[in-house]
Amino acid sequence: MKDKILMVLCGLVGLGMVVFGLNKFLNFMPVPEDMPQAAKDAFGHLMGLGWLMPLIAMGEIVGGALFAFPKTRALGALVLFPIVVGIVAHDFHMGDLFAGPAPVFFLVVVWAIINSKDQYMPMIKQ
């Protein structure tokens, strides 16, 4: 039962990350009107670095696609982990940590990493 819940959650998180990554290229979701000025300034600075947002978007798309499927979930979790940590840190710094899906995405990715720890052991064993 726990594996089925994880499978559904990982599929939804993977799909969400692909959608958010595609949004960075296609801009099909509008920017919220009530976004704090500090958040707008932070995104303005990130957009000033022309290479950073496309890199994050590609990580979200590739990591989300890998994370959605059980066979590649461990690799997808490694790709997504630094991205969701950055998103959660940004949300925490801006003071709206629980306003979006970021904490849920973070917890699901951590759960998947813990659940796949046997697949990571060959990387750290000597």
Image (cartoon, helix red, strand yellow):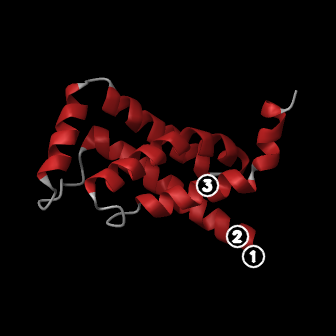
* Badge 1 density bin: few <14, some 14–19, many ≥20, Cα 10 Å: few
Q: Which of marks 3 and 1 is in front?
A: 3
* Badge 3 density bin: few <14, some 14–19, many ≥20, Cα 10 Å: some
In the picture provided, is 115 more to the left or to the right than 98?
right
* Badge 2 density bin: few <14, some 14–19, many ≥20, Cα 10 Å: few
In the picture provided, is 1 more to the left or to the right than 38?
right
Distance from Cα at disc 2 to Cα at disc 3: 16 Å
Give the structural element (helix, strand or loop) at label 3.
helix
Give the structural element (helix, strand or loop) at label 2.
helix
**Are the residues tagged 2 and 1 within 8 Å (C-beta)?**
yes
Taking the spot 54% from the left edge, 44% from the top edge, the residue there is 81
Instruction: Compare residues 28 and 24 and report the one nearer the observer.
Output: 24
Taking the spot 42% from the left edge, 58% from the top edge, the residue there is 102
Residue at the spot of label 2: 4
Question: Disc 2 or 3, which lies upstream in sequence?
Answer: 2
Pick the quarter of the image with the N terminus.
bottom right
Q: Position of residue 4 (x, y in %)?
A: 70, 70
Three-letter amino acid code at disc 3? Answer: Val
As drawn, 7 above or below 90:
below
Q: Which of marks 2 and 3 is in front?
A: 3
Residue at the spot of label 1: 1
Q: Where is residue 105 in the image (x, y as percent from the top left)?
A: 49, 58
Residue at the spot of label 3: 110
Give the structural element (helix, strand or loop) at label 1.
loop
Taking the spot 39% from the left edge, 29% from the top edge, the residue there is 55
Res 54 → quadrant: top left
Pick the quarter of the image with the C terminus.
top right
Distance from Cα at disc 2 to Cα at disc 1: 5 Å
